[in-house]
Image (cartoon, rainbow, N blue to C red):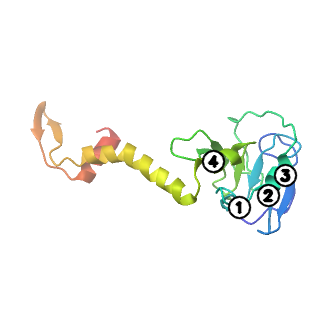
Amino acid sequence: MADTHETISCPACGKTMKKVFIPNLGINIDICTEGCGGIFFDNREFKQFDEQNESIDMITKELENKEFIPVDENQVRICPACGAKMVKNSTRAEGDVIVDDCYSCGGKFLDHGELEKIRKEFRTEKDRAGDAVRYLYSKVGKEIAAASNPYASERVAGNMQWKKHSPIYNLFTKIMGL
């Protein structure tokens, strides 16, 4: 979805969000400057600001020296761009920053302070991807290794019999709890 040009309401507090034009990127970022301090990024805009080497000066300038109202970060949020229910996702495998993603239009809403926290997690997108791979291997890799035992046991008519199964069969039965 393209950059929203109409004024939108903040999905966290309902206040009108301010359009902040970022000239070097040619995009508008929606910032809740009079309410909760949240930021809405249209589809793919967030990728322009999530790494430590990318400038967020214009965003921080809009938010500095302001008091923001508290919001319930656990509330269901509705995408201000398309009206779909947003989904809460963690920014890293075992992270504590939860953002609201719209699976319909690709928008992303961050509560006040979350952009800075996300930028501190990893220097680059490559580092972030490496974290996901390490987490996946540490959690799922052990299950795959255990399931790939060619002599997995199977209980047949009350007797323990050894049967050779493929690693995929073993993984499937382990996941399904069979």
In the displayed structure image, the side of residue 36 where residue 128 appears, left or right: left
- In the foreground, 76 or 47: 47
**C-alpha span from label 3 to label 2:** 13 Å
Q: Amino acid at mark 4?
A: Lys
In the displayed structure image, the side of residue 50 where residue 178 appears, left or right: left
Indicate which disc, 3 or 2, sits on the residue closer to the N terminus: 2
How crowded is the residue under tag 1: few (<14 C-alpha within 10 Å), some, or many (20+)? some
Q: Which residue is disc 2 drawn over?
A: 29
Q: Which residue is disc 1 drawn over?
A: 45
Q: Amino acid at mark 2?
A: Ile
Identify which residue is drawn at 65% across, 50% down.
119
**C-alpha span from label 4 to label 3:** 19 Å
Residue 103, x across and y down, in percent: 63, 54
Indicate which disc, 4 or 2, sits on the residue closer to the N terminus: 2
Callout 3: SS: helix
**C-alpha span from label 4 to label 2:** 20 Å
Q: Amino acid at mark 3?
A: Lys
Indicate which disc, 1 or 3, sits on the residue closer to the N terminus: 1
Q: Which label was assigned to residue 120?
A: 4
Residue 49, x across and y down, in percent: 69, 58
Q: Nearer the viewer, mark 3 or mark 2?
A: 3
- In the foreground, 123 or 132: 123
Indicate which disc, 4 or 3, sits on the residue closer to the N terminus: 3
Q: Which residue is disc 3 drawn over?
A: 61
Tag 2 near tag 1, CB within 8 Å: yes
Identify which residue is drawn at 11% across, 34% down.
160
Within the image, what quadrant is residue 175 found in?
A: top left
